[in-house]
Amino acid sequence: FKRKEIEDALNKWLSPRAAPGGAADRPAAVEETVAELEAVAAPAPGLAEDSEPEPLEPAIRVDELLDTFMGKKEIVLPLLGRFMERTESQIAGLPTLLERADWETLRREAHTLKGSALNLRAGELGNRAAAAEFAAKNQDAEASRAAIEALAPAYERFKRAATDLIDSEKE
């Protein structure tokens, strides 16, 4: 998050009653909270401010995925391949839907991506798609744009993990 985004959110949600001294303390409360959030959210040493850190959760929870399909890799591996074939072009088409303000198709595409990703135990990708679905449902262009942009790096992490898993079974 950028400082301005944090300040805007706090100003929107912090009512004058929320600050201990009423409206007079509100700017101080916002400033103090922003400073605390910036300290916690500071980029790790050596990480560029605009780069995205690796998520804490794996791109694919392989053990859960295999459990879902009763350990049958002969089913899982082709599913991963078909998902990757379809998903790359699906994600690439989302900005066009946003440009056309085709909210229903954008919502439906994001919903499909969300469901497929979550079924394949790709939590980060599924959650990013859920954000795009929600933004499209609310016809929020700015949130939709941000959610669509966030899908690409999540998909790339998924693709690396899926390709590694498929390749490991070929050896």
Image: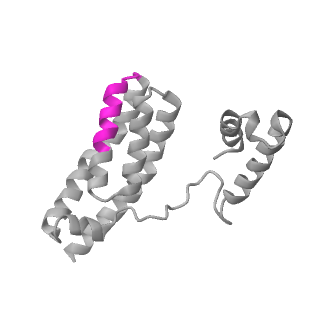
- The rendered magenta stretch, by its main secondary structure, is classed as helix
**Closer to us: 13 or 134:** 13
Indicate whether 60 appears above or below 5.
below
Write the residue at 51% across / 39% down: 146
Residue ID at (24%, 49%): 85
| Above or below 115: residue 66 | below
- Horizontal arrangement in the rendering, residue 46 relative to residue 99 (left or right): right
Whole-percent x and y of residue 134? 42, 36
- Residue 116: x %, y % from top left: 26, 49
Examine the rendered structure and indicate whether residue 140 appears above or below residue 121: above
Q: Residue at x 44, y 64 (%)?
A: 57
Q: Is residue 52 left or right of residue 74?
A: right
Q: Position of residue 56 (x, y in %)?
A: 49, 65
Per the rendered image, the range of residues in magenta is 100-113
Percent x, y for residue 107? 35, 32
Q: Identify the image quadrant of the C terminus.
A: bottom left
Which residue is more in the foreground, 170 or 4? 4
